[in-house]
Image (spheres, grey):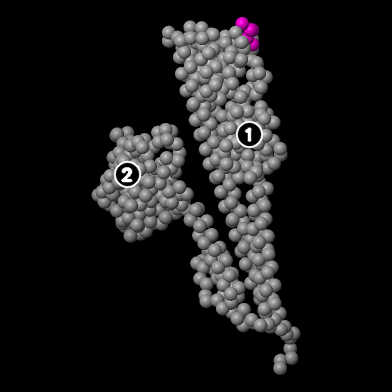
Amino acid sequence: MHAGGSRVSLRWQLALLVALCVLPLLGFGALLVQRYSAQLLTQVEGETLLLAKKVMAEVDREWASVEGGLAVLATSDDLIQGRWEAFRRQAHSAIAAGMSRNYVVTDAQGRQLFNTLVPAGQALPEGGTPPELLTVLQGRPALTGWFLGPVTGQPTVAMGVPVRAAGEVRYALNVGLPAARLSDFLTRQPLPDGWLIALIDRSGRIVTRSREGQRYAGQPVTTDLAAALAQGAEGKVLATTKEGIPVYTAFTTSERWGWRVAVGAPVHLLQAEQQRVLRGLVLAGGLALVAGILMAAWLAQRVLTTVRALNQAAANLHRGGALELPPLQLKEAEEVGRALERAAQSMEQVQYLANHDPLTGLANRGLFFEVGRQRLELARRQQRPLALLALDLDGFKPVNDHHGHAVGDALLKEVADRLLETSRSADVVARLGGDEFVLLLSDTDADQARQTGERLLAALAPPWSAAPQPVTVSIGLALYPADGERLEDLLLQADRALYAAKAAGKQRLSARP
């Protein structure tokens, strides 16, 4: 026997090895938890913004309905001629059929001439007309913010339309809408637990909320949300509610009326999910460590072999390599292997989402530039031609405006499907944003590129199953090296050619003159 040096039993050596193997896995798991948390936050932000847009669209539809009813009532001959008692009967019929509280007719100075809440013969209020309604006499509809009705003293919003006679605006016909009824827009929305929706007027005051709407009606939004609202029509911000609860908030704005919808998801719910995953990671790591130590003496060689294999696979995955699991002899090791496979799948999914457009599945701008520069460098070394086609839909905006973003998204997906069906497997097909697409064609000269462009014009011609109105495509062509030697230059030339195609009548292919 060798007498020098201290010796440690195989059990303790294996226990140390198990610890050394489990701890890196725990570190890797912590990295996955961090990435999962970031992905979860991105998902929550996307869902809040999507819900805000959905509710805003519904609110705009309601206002359009109210405006339409007002416009019809404003054509009443009794109203135009000032026959107030006859008009009163019409107004009360309209109140019974809709969600309005009362109708008010005002003159150019904002003085009330008629109010369904004030019986005939009684004095009308001398003031209290919101200043926004004074602009109705200039010939355009108006929507007020939150205010207290001068007759009811209750929270109210109002909409007004001009009443014309002989080609001139004679009166403003205004309808009062109880702020409490506006909560119907919000309470009928299915919300995750703890989420909150707020309807905000142009001045930044809360009109109502999906929770305790009457309590906070008329109050200004919190300072952090107000600062975000001042920055733009749409955005995301970490804000606090009026109760002081931190929330991930997304907001959007009505293009017609300037009102806002804000949706907040409580931060603590996201943190609770993160803590749950982290506790699971710690528990799983602790159990794996204890089990490894208890089985050290019995499974010495098998455990050593298996752990080494798993450690190598985990280290390779951590470095960004492919996950290659060898045959495993232990059931517990197979469980860890499956966990690594799930982790690898999660990382692949994160990688995919980072490089692809979430709506169409096409390459996004980042992946297009990464692959495009590689293809351009290859074309430069091999002295081979390369073509770039920039595509933009003609008449896409009316689809969104008239039929909603859901129809527009479906149309974009159908466009992506047709692009993939028409292009070669070696072509790079990407969506740069909105209704802008681009194709990078390797080893393609001018004639081949034009033939491809003509096929795309035919493939992307109406009819569309997703859109009820005709939508076409215009295409701009740029060639390497004639139009530039950098990808940015080719894209610029293709965009210029695209604009030329649109200027020439759309639904055509254009190249650099």
- The image position of residue 223, as x and y in percent, is 67, 34
Q: Mark 1 or mark 2: which is in front?
A: 1
Disc 1: which residue: 209
Q: Is residue 106 above or below residue 248?
A: above
SS state under label 2: loop
The residue carrying pointer 1 sits among few (fewer than 14), some (14 to 19) or many (20 or more) residues within 10 Å by Cα, namely many
Q: Is residue 492 visible?
A: no
In depth, the one of 353 and 53 nearer the eye is 53
Lower position in the chain sequence, tag 1 or tag 2: 1
Q: Quadrant of residue 250?
A: top right
Q: Is residue 91 visible?
A: yes
Magenta segment: does it hold 165?
no
| Residue drawn where x is 33% and y is 52% of the image | 421
What's the magenta region?
121-125
| Residue drawn where x is 55% and y is 17% of the image | 92
- The image position of residue 213, as x and y in percent, is 65, 32
| Residue drawn where x is 74% and y is 91% of the image | 3
Decide whether the magenta segment is chiefly helix, strand or loop: loop
User: The N terminus is located in which quarter?
Assistant: bottom right
Q: Quadrant of residue 233?
A: top right
- The image position of residue 107, as x and y in percent, is 55, 10
Label of residue 460 in the image: 2
* Badge 2 amino acid: Leu
* Badge 1 amino acid: Arg
The residue carrying pointer 2 sits among few (fewer than 14), some (14 to 19) or many (20 or more) residues within 10 Å by Cα, namely many
Give left or right: position of 430 versus 270.
Answer: left
